[in-house]
Image: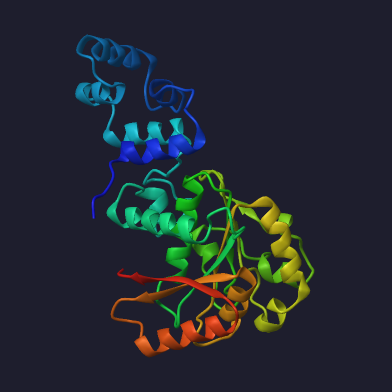
Amino acid sequence: MNFATPESIISRAAQHHGLASQSIGAILVDSGRLSADAAESIIKLQKAEGLRFGDAAIQLGLLTEADVRYALSHQFNYPYLLPDDKNISEEVVAAFKPFSPVVEKLRALRSQLMLRWFDGETGNKMLALTSPDTGEGRSYIAANLAVVFSQLGERTLLIDADLRNPRQHEIFKLGNRTGLSTILAGRTTLDESINRIPNLLGLSVLPAGAIPPNPQELLSRPQFTSMLQAAQQQFDVILFDTSAGAEFADAQMIAARAGGAIVLSRKNITHASRLRDLTTSLQHSGATVVGSVLNGN
């Protein structure tokens, strides 16, 4: 597989968002990463040798490649996080290493989903991610897939619908007192429970909330349908992280409400028979199995 360069990836995002209005130099000066005097030195070399601003800055030793990528990401509304950002877990590689091979594969998955499911003509906005058992990477894939959708400019909501062993509040370092369970119990509203991720434009996360004693009963309530109707008015893409599909019926219920599901498996971990049984049960629930993903991590 051929992997795109950081500049080409950001350029694709720029086409989606529209051209940027602020220069790289201005962004770096405003962020404190570059002094005004240093910027002038870079501009002089840039003009003298016909270089790009970033190349001239690196040649002078005034900026690193990471600094230039940071500026490009902000210039074209393609946000990602620097390694010292502690507000989100390092598991969210799409936020910290958006130009790595593993994230390129996530973008390839996103492209397939945009063509096959979120194509605009069908009106599909929701998709469940499930797998047969625990430890197969559902939360990891869901979190990173949500980030790459938001980087495309899609208003993205990630719902932690695993009401048994939720993880998204840990990954995004959020509180978990309110969330899906408290909405379904009638104690809070969607707007009160959503967490917008400030450094990742377009991404919102709905944690699972307090773990209830009756997940299946809560998911069967009409409040779930009402909440999803409201969410579809606000968001372009809604992804569900679910509980283990072979252990509980929660995932099938959620997939049926979402309309579609991706079935995940993990290399050397998932049993083929359990994967096959889960796929069959999802289809019997009325959900479309959009595809499958092999998690090699």
Which of the two residues, 49 or 16, is positioned nearer the viewer here? 16
The vertical placement of 155 against 294, above or below, is above
Point out residue 271 in the picture as x, y percentages from the top left corner: 35, 87
Please state, as top left, top right, bottom left or bottom right, where the C terminus lies in the image.
bottom left
Left or right side of 36 for 122: right
Image quadrant where residue 122 sits: bottom right
Which of the two residues, 260 or 106, is positioned nearer the viewer here? 260
Point out residue 291 in the picture as x, y percentages from the top left corner: 43, 70
Which of the two residues, 266 or 26, is positioned nearer the viewer here? 266
Q: Residue at x 54, y 73 (%)?
A: 288
| Numbered disc total | 0
Point out residue 191 in the picture as x, y percentages from the top left corner: 72, 54
Q: Residue furthest right?
A: 186
The vertical placement of 170 against 25, above or below, is below
Q: Residue at x 56, y 49 (%)?
A: 197
Point out residue 76 in the picture as x, y percentages from the top left corner: 45, 33
Which of the two residues, 247 or 226, is positioned nearer the viewer here? 226
Image quadrant where residue 287 sits: bottom right
Left or right side of 244 for 220: right
Left or right side of 135 for 55: left
Q: Residue furthest front?
A: 121
Q: Residue at x 68, y 51 (%)?
A: 234
Q: Residue at x 68, y 77 (%)?
A: 219
